[in-house]
Amino acid sequence: MIMLWATFSLAQNFTHVKPTPQQIAWQDLEIGAIIHFGPNTFMDREWGDGTADPSVFNPSSVDPEQWMRAAKSAGVKYVVFVAKHHDGFCLWPTAKSQYSIKSSPWKAGQGDLVRDVAAAARKYGLKFGVYLSPWDRHEPSYQDSAAYDGYYLAQLNELVATYGELVEFWLDGAGSAGHVYDFDRYVDNLRVYQPNTLIFADAALLKYGDIRWVGNEDGGTPEENWNVLDLRGYLRYRPAEADTPLRKNHWFWHPHDENSLKSVGELMDIYHQTVGRGAQLMIGLAPDDRGLLPDADVSRLKEFGEAVNSIYAPEKNLAARATNASAYHAALDSDPDTMWSAPERSHSATIDLVFAHPISFDRALTMEWLVDGQKVQKYAIQVVVGAKWKTVCSGTTIGHKKIDLFPRISTQHVRLNLLSASGTARIREFQLFDGTRTSAR
């Protein structure tokens, strides 16, 4: 028994916790979208109280394929559809309640938006997931925790058994103060039908989720971002997802709301503070009362995607021009399926690049190979100025991806200096870009 306990304790070392293949694949998606649409859309509300008549839901031109085209133009790789928000109105014809689209005039009550959105996502090569709000302000059984558990579980089973593979199942605890949910049963049933689905939840709500909420809705992630979470000694690999709406403070569409649309500059700042700090960016999209994303939103998503690509497209990677690139090829090739490894059992290493002519750049993109867990604890990016090394930026964690911004500099000698690692550091990518030149065009 003592030997078994010792083995378990070693396995729970913070730096030894590893991600699942599903988590690694999910992190590679990098940008998602969560879509809010329902009675709130037609009532100028963010949170419905569960009393809206189903007749208010009657969009004239619902086109989930338009949503997916717009999302894809922004670089979105997966979508989560809000199948039921806090008002309890269901966007699929659930057998558990009449409070759903089957009681609405839309498609004479014969529609199924979850089915339509899932089909549109897959048509455009996007992964699909759902959000089923635990808080339900319409369902009478909500007042009885045990009875409501049965209700919620039945609806969960409808979603996870009917609409194909789900990349993510969203949970949150909004409005649930004092209510007790049987999350163990929810997760057990989810796993029967969807063993590969990742569960998103606030760490305080569900300690054994697969993804964690970053802690705000502004698109901000701390510079130091460890993927392993310690909950009173319970260690789990839980990368962060940072959700933020395309329109400031609004998850649902509202009329006369043109000034709330975030600018391309604001979206780029958010990108650097989420994807650029090893977190997932989840952009909130809101179809209007026609059932379409507004033209301004469609244009802004496209502009954002173009802005990211104009800087970070593989052909813009200056590091690949190094005269000694072959020595570090797997870290410079813009192929995340390859990686460069430091010497085995080392705790420090460098990627040292030399260029035939000076290059000018103002940012570095570094990706850590995480199959064996997150290892890098301290690093610096340094250049030779004159005859001396100069540190242009330094940090602690790298994780899935780290984008460091700094004043533009020219040099012929650059290195990624891995100063401290808990084990052998492995780097998927080390790239250099000149965003200043791109922005000036």
Image (tube, rainbow, N blue to C red):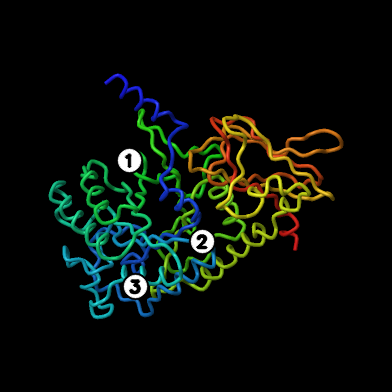
Q: CA distance from mark 3 to mark 1?
A: 31 Å
- Rendered residue at 15%/52% (across/down): 150
**Which one is earlier in the sequence, the residue at label 2 or at label 1?**
1
Q: CA distance from mark 2 to mark 1?
A: 36 Å
Q: Indicate the secondary structure of the residue bearing disc 2.
A: helix
- Rendered residue at 25%/63% (across/down): 89
Q: Which label is found at residue 116?
A: 3
**Which one is earlier in the sequence, the residue at label 3 or at label 1?**
3
Q: Indicate the secondary structure of the residue bearing disc 3.
A: helix
Would residue 135 appear left or right of 404 to someone viewing this image? Answer: left
| Furthest residue in direction right, as rendered | 386
**Residue 98: percent from the left, percent from the top?**
17, 67
- Rendered residue at 53%/40% (across/down): 222
- Rendered residue at 34%/44% (across/down): 209
Q: Quadrant of the N terminus?
A: top left
Q: Residues within 10 Å of mark 2 (few under 14, many from 20)?
A: some
**Residue 399: percent from the left, percent from the top?**
54, 42
Residue designated by label 1: 208
Asked if residue 185 is positioned above or below residue 165 in the image, the reply reads: above
Q: Amino acid at mark 1?
A: Tyr
Asked if residue 284 is positioned above or below residue 399 in the image, the reply reads: below
Q: Quadrant of the C terminus?
A: bottom right
**Residue 58: percent from the left, percent from the top?**
31, 76
Q: Which label is found at residue 260?
A: 2
